[in-house]
Amino acid sequence: MNADTGVLDGAIPPSQNTRLFGHEQACAFLADAYRSDHLHHAILLEGPEGIGKATLAYRFAYHLLMHEDPKTAPAALADPDLASPVIRQVAGGASHNLLHLARPLDTKTGRVKSAITVDEVRRAGHFLSQTSGSGNWRIVIVDPADDMNRSAANAILKILEEPPKKSLFLVLSHAPGKLLPTIRSRCMPLRLTPLNDQQMREGLAHLELSDHQEPQIVDAVIRHSEGSLSNAILLLRYGGLEIAEAFEQILKDGPERSQKKIHTLADSMTARDRETAYAFFTAYAANRLVSLAREAAADGDLHTAQHWASASSGLQENLAIADGYNLDRKQTILSVFSSVFRMPAA
């Protein structure tokens, strides 16, 4: 992962991505809302991580900046032309009309901070208070809003309550339930869904990630990625596929037969350069337990569904404690499986 941008190796930064897979209805809705001059000042783009929310946000921002007058704007969002001066300025971080708020770089450690801070939101306030040199839109992309700490969330809420004229907030959220209800109430929600298998194949080809891969590997990546291209990158480039398959095998074998495999998996993620793989494992495990609970409920097996839901809650609690106290990774992974095996394996 690029330490300065937080972009995964193999991914294209959303500001420079010329392709968007899926989300045709969302694109059409946004284009129509702008053209009809009924655009809300804050739009909440919500959905799982890695499905194209940021790419859509930049695509829509480019649409506004390239077509200042809604009445003459095209009826559809176009693929961005990277040769355009407007898009080059945004992609280079030199635009006076678009500000991207994300977790900032800690100059002391050289790593991205764990949260979007209030100082970042104050930058947005200063940015919006300035007069646009072109008289064009002022656009703020919050990516993702889930990363804001409490002070930052309260600060951005004040701006959303009294937004400047001709300003637009594109608020991204992987888990909108984590947002302050008052922030949600001031945004127009636009739900994006995971990519289907065909869209995943097209996305992998666009990123050149499926080149020279065996068909069964590509199939496994799509199966485990849950419609997320960022998950696919983690599976292919960060050892995620081996992690996912090891986790599934441990679930299948049960606790008594899996002790050695659990410790081997935990040991593999203790190295300093395995932060991204560790983050993938914790997210994958949490999502997998939720999926198991839903599958059991859909089958009418409410007892098993309750067990998996309880395991998911326990896992989330353990992860929150580990993150808050910066606990040892191996011990955290062992606690994950402690939560998992409080009930029968699937």
Image (cartoon, rainbow, N blue to C red):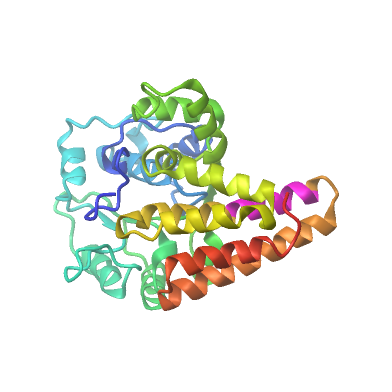
Seen at 17% across and 50% down, the residue is 93
Seen at 37% across and 21% down, the residue is 212
161 to 294, vertically: above or below: below
Q: Is residue 192 visible?
A: no
Numbered marks: total: 0
Q: Can residue 186 be seen in this view?
A: yes
Between 285 and 205, the residue placed more toward the observer is: 285
Q: In this view, does 269 lie to the left or right of 333?
A: left
Magenta segment: 287-297
Picture coordinates of residue 208 (x, y %)? 34, 27
Find out whether residue 290 is within the magenta segment: yes
Q: In this view, does 252 lie to the left or right of 170?
A: right
| Magenta stretch: helix, strand or loop mostly | helix
Find out whether residue 323 is within the magenta segment: no
Seen at 56% across and 32% down, the residue is 196
242 to 43, vertically: above or below: above
Picture coordinates of residue 61 (x, y %)? 32, 44
Seen at 46% across and 65% down, the residue is 330
